[in-house]
Image (cartoon, grey):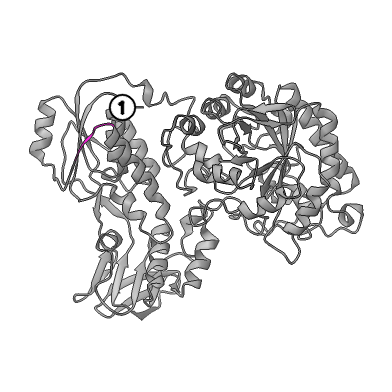
Amino acid sequence: MASLTGSVELGSRTAPSRVLFGPHETNLGIRRALSPRHVAYYEARAEGGAGVIVTEIASVHESDWPYERAPLAADCDWSAIVKACRPHGTLVLAGLGHSGSQGSTAYSQDALWAPSRVPDVASRELPLEMDAGQIQALIDGFARATGVAVQSGVDGVEINAGQFSLLRQFLSGLTNQRGDDWGEDKGKLLREVLTAVKGVLGNGILGLRLSCDELAPWAGVTPEHAVELVRSLDVDYLAVVRGSAMGTSATRPDLHTEPGFNIELSRRIRAVATFPIVLQGSVVDPGQAQWALDDGVADLVEMTRAQIADPALVSKVRAGHSIRPCSLDNAKCMVRDNRNPLVTCSAEPRSGHESTDPGIESGAPHDGHALVVGGGPAGLEAARVLALRGYQVRLTERAAELGGALALAAKVGGRGRLQSFVDWLIAQVTALGVDVRLKTESTAADLEQASRNGDVIVLATGSKPGRRPYSVVGEPHVVGYQEFYEAGALVSDGPVVVFDPVGGPIGVGTAELVAASGRETALITQDQVVGTLLAITGDLADANRRVQQAGVTLHKATLLREVHPAHLVVEDRFTARRREIPCATLIDCGHRLPDDSLAHPDAISAGDRVAPRTVHEAVLEGRRAAGVR
């Protein structure tokens, strides 16, 4: 029986495990070249036991410039990455592709290439229809890029015909409307590219990432089409993915989609393939990955986000240790936007910063004492790292449970996976012997005593309700979202209105949750779409669909002005016209302010105690408060 941590043959090579670290944007590049940051990033996953690493996709032709720091194969040198990963036995493959009409003209200042003049559904940009010369230039570009990679010493290449790819656009009736040979035989270009690459690759591994279901059966690639195409292919492995330009969240959805969403698609393709199949699809649990191997779903499993969260995933599975869980929130690992954020992880801030962050183990051992006030993610991480460094740590939490705002956020509709990180942190501090005292309110005297003793003091006391941006008339039932989740239920009957001035996941998830209980529910937002911040995680379109399907009444571009016992007064953001809407309970999902009721000059603040924080910021500040810079 195949073991997830056991070796596997791929072409003429042997991978030390069946776990693949797949290609993804990192923004770690310097201009359009790979950088020392890339080297450290991939080396950490190789050291952690990854069997195969596919580097982020490099454009094979200068016509393709999909985002500012997208690698260009002609400018790339993979040799430093290969040298760093080789001592661990990990196979390094260069990801190669062309994004076609899904690219950007902002950087190339040239028309987008495409099989036909079909506007991209996201940008609405109209591409040019490639002529015979450009098609040949593309094929030659794949061959030249392969040559550059081979000269760098890679073990092979992976050709991208997945969601963001020109090769997929040629395969699909959605985008290929040509009347010539390239349109009549939509798989012709892919086969010619693979043939050209093989001619240069020698005995290296040839991998293919293929969209086997565009989720658009009226014209797109369907599993039936994919099965027929796969029968005609000759590659060393196939990574089965889904999606097209019409559903960008399909390939890399957030925590609302169950892990392993491509299992049945992968099983179907494996039934006809004569080469190894890679399962892709939010697989972050080693148990599920091993099950997929045992059940014949695939021969390898891609666990990219899981290894961003814990680079040592495979090594820890081998040793029987728990891994740092990936919540699939996409908050810090989705970096394809014009702000150029570096790839990292909410739960592991060192990811993407391996070349500049010395890591927890760099801290000098210590035999002192520490007091951490607050048991949310910042406090738990501070306590964990302090304990790892040898401190005797006491953690006080005024509530009856640990987890703070993160544990409450896990109760928001559809976000239950966040609890896995809370549970991991609690297990870690427990195993490290941290003295956890629940239902304990630390005082100024406690801080003063700790200071006199020379103890490290970390204040992670969280937040408190901020000023309400509306007037309250009479005695209406108004609760903050934290109070709502702490109570676990609504105490009054009648319509519920969720007020979301932030545009984040809490407002949307709360409205979904309340509506699912059968209550008449409305959502107020000042924005023109619901949950605008969810564009960062790829959940924006899906979130708007979910709240509408749940029957939530949406009041968009609307300001909340007055709250009365049985109704609200709202104002149109653009016309200033006021109107009333019924409301028995208002759930306020607005920003909260730091709880600074406890302070000491020797204390270090972290998390919401500093300002409203994301999980990533809270964990990073907790770690820094523990002395790891």
Count all numbered tags in the image, as a single digit. 1
Quarter of the image that includes the N terminus? top right
Label 1: few (<14), some (14–19) or many (≥20) C-alpha neighbours in 10 Å: many
In screen coordinates, is 180 left or right of 279? right
Looking at the picture, tell me which residue is in the foreground, 544 or 428.
428
Residue 57 is a magenta residue: no
Q: Quadrant of residue 424?
A: top left
Region rendered in magenta: 432-436
In screen coordinates, is 36 left or right of 94? left
Residue 596 vertical position relative to residue 470 in the rendered view, above or below = above
Quarter of the image that includes the C terminus? top left
Rendering coords of residue 177 (x, y %): 83, 60
**Would residue 453 be seen by someone viewing this image from the given angle?**
yes
Amino acid at circle 1: Leu
In screen coordinates, is 304 left or right of 621? right
Looking at the picture, tell me which residue is in the foreground, 6 or 433.
6
Looking at the picture, tell me which residue is in the foreground, 513 or 579.
513
